[in-house]
Image: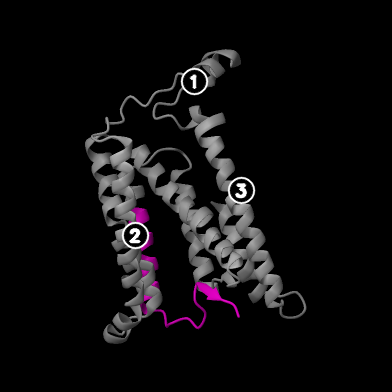
Amino acid sequence: MMVVFILLALPTIMDVFPSTKATPEDHILLTQRVTAIILVILLLTFLVFRLGTHAAMFASTPFSQRDYARSDYQSRQSQITEAQIPQPYIGKGPAAIILAAASAFALVCTHYIVGSLSGVASITGMNQSFLAVTLVPLLGNSIKYRSIVMGSRSLNQVELGIRSVINNVLRVTMLLAPLLVLIGWAFDQPLILRFDGFEATTLLLSVVVMTYLISDGRSNYFEGLMLIGTYMIITFAFFVRPEASVNVIFLGT
């Protein structure tokens, strides 16, 4: 996550802290595009690492390599099964159709929600940054959050819940955001993911707190409360903060 933060924050650093003079927009745009390509490559490599070469490290019930020789370790890697995963209720075909239809409807709903942010901000007096940080993620991922909580409580799969949240973060930062940059490049629409100082600092502190709390592979209710408290502090800071002059996503000209 720290590497992802560094790659995402580089355009902001180049713009806010130039060496001797302001960095040309073309150089920042080129850096953003190279960063997007590197992030996509890292994500693909992570998938190979996660699902192929080192799948044993991500098993629900990890086993230690110290108990047997390396050759035995290689043979047992292929025998890992996820016995506690519930059996599917429907086949792959109907599930794919339902997923495609649900994704299409979610895309339409998100389009209207994002389009109405300016109207909601003008009526309520809230800034759009606060609405974008709190309202849009909560509405778009509320069902997923509920599934994670219910699965963690009923199936005692807290580890899988944490992994699901981390995978969601990686998907947004290493796939969706870079793809937006690359698609904009393909259609000759310059797109720069630019943070201001407050947003970059908030992202860094969030990554540091999350990495520190999950680094030992254990969790308890107090650490969960710390994460909730951190989220509440960040959202309140966005609520009282004046509207920024530069958006998180900046469209170059």
Q: Secondary structure at mark 1?
A: loop
- The way the protein has been coloured in the rendering is one colour
Residue found at the far right of this picture: 20
- Disc tally is 3
Q: In this image, 73 relative to 218: left or right?
A: right
Disc 3 marks a residue whose amino acid type is Ile
Q: Secondary structure at mark 3?
A: helix
Which span is picked out in magenta?
225-253
Tell which circle, 2 or 3, labels the residue nearer the N-terminal end. 3
Marks 1 and 3: in contact by CB < 8 Å? no
What's the CA distance linking mark 2 and mark 3? 34 Å
Percent of width and height locating residue 121: 32, 82
Disc 1 marks a residue whose amino acid type is Ser
Tag 2: Cα neighbours inside 10 Å, few (<14), some, or many (≥20)? Answer: few
Identify the residue position indicated by label 3 in the image.
41
Percent of width and height locating residue 252: 59, 77
Residue 16 lies, with reference to residue 125, above or below; the image says above
Identify the residue position indicated by label 2 in the image.
229
Specify whether residue 232 is in view.
Answer: no
What's the residue at 32%, 72% (across, down)? 112
What's the CA distance linking mark 3 and mark 1? 26 Å
Q: In this image, 199 relative to 139: left or right?
A: right
Identify the residue position indicated by label 1 in the image.
78
Q: Nearer the viewer, residue 117 or 57?
A: 117
